[in-house]
Amino acid sequence: MKALLPLVLLAISLAPGAHAESSHDKGLAIVEEMDRRDRGWKDQRANLVMTLRNRQGQESRRELRISTLEVEGDGDKSLTVFDTPRDVKGTAFLSHTHATKPDDQWLYLPALKRVKRIASRNKSGSFMGSEFAYEDLSSQEVEKYTYKWLRDEVLDGKNTMVVEYYPTYENSGYTRQVVWIDSEIWKVVRTEFHDRKNALLKTLTIRDYHRYADSFWRAGAMHVVNHQTGKSTDIQWSDYQFDTGLGERDFDRSALKRMR
């Protein structure tokens, strides 16, 4: 019965004569249904190319790989390892996302040969000089936010549902996020992040979705632009693999030094 709850709530919120205050119930139902549709992949591997661009248009390129473990009853675990360029080769980032308590995150710096824990108050900081914050790298567990449906909208020729996310956890760098969800594949295609002063900070665009293993939609490209600094970051995803046999041991702290 639990799996049917999001659909029931969504049907109620869409019903003629639904009360205005149901926009919060509708927002929650949409996100719960999106979460339900992306369960069961067990583990995932992928390769990434990250391109950092400053205000003047100068670029730097990094190649990295990421492994992710689906965790029942809590947030997912992920391990990211940088392969190029030489000055960041071997840098590894481990994230244990939690639904209702602060995430655990660590960064291994090979030059110092030590593991640095990312404090909760620093999770709004830049990840390795990119326009992604540490908190952006956590799996987006439903319990991390409260929600409000704003409207349905056609975006770039696609029907989308626009939902506002409000962080429930402390030390978030955002007051709110405005999120566009493709109503056909139930995946996020655009997010606007508003900073602690409620000013528009950055916009993330996600595109080139493909379906893998006959079930799971994954993005081919991401572009985030910081409207306040003029900097941007692009990510190209490739070589997705699912259910590869990863386990808990592949995501413990010692894995940071093993994955080089």
Image (cartoon, rainbow, N blue to C red):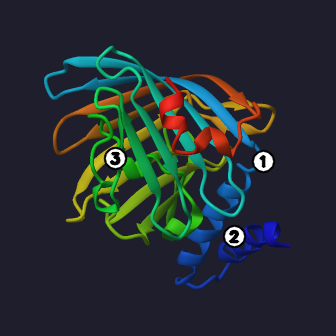
Q: Residues within 10 Å of mark 1 (few under 14, many from 20)?
A: few
What separation in Å lies between label 3 and label 1 (alpha carbons)? 27 Å
Q: Closer to the camera, 26 or 69?
A: 69
Quarter assignment of residue 119: bottom left
Query: Residue 145: horizontal and vertical position, in percent?
Result: 49, 68
Q: Closer to the camera, 50 or 109?
A: 109
Pointer 2 or 1: first along the chain: 2
Q: Is residue 209 above or below residue 123?
A: above
**Location of mark 2 (residue):** 10
**Location of mark 3 (residue):** 133
The amino acid beneath tag 2 is Leu
The residue furthest left is 56
Q: Residues within 10 Å of mark 3 (few under 14, many from 20)?
A: some
Q: Closer to the camera, 13 or 200?
A: 200
Residue at disc 1, secondary structure? loop
The amino acid beneath tag 1 is Gly
Query: Residue 6: horizontal and vertical position, in percent?
Result: 72, 69
The amino acid beneath tag 3 is Ala
Pointer 3 or 1: first along the chain: 1
The residue furthest right is 1
Position of residue 1 in the picture relative to residue 56 (left or right): right
Position of residue 244 in the picture relative to residue 93 (left or right): right
**Location of mark 1 (residue):** 40
Q: Closer to the camera, 18 or 77?
A: 77
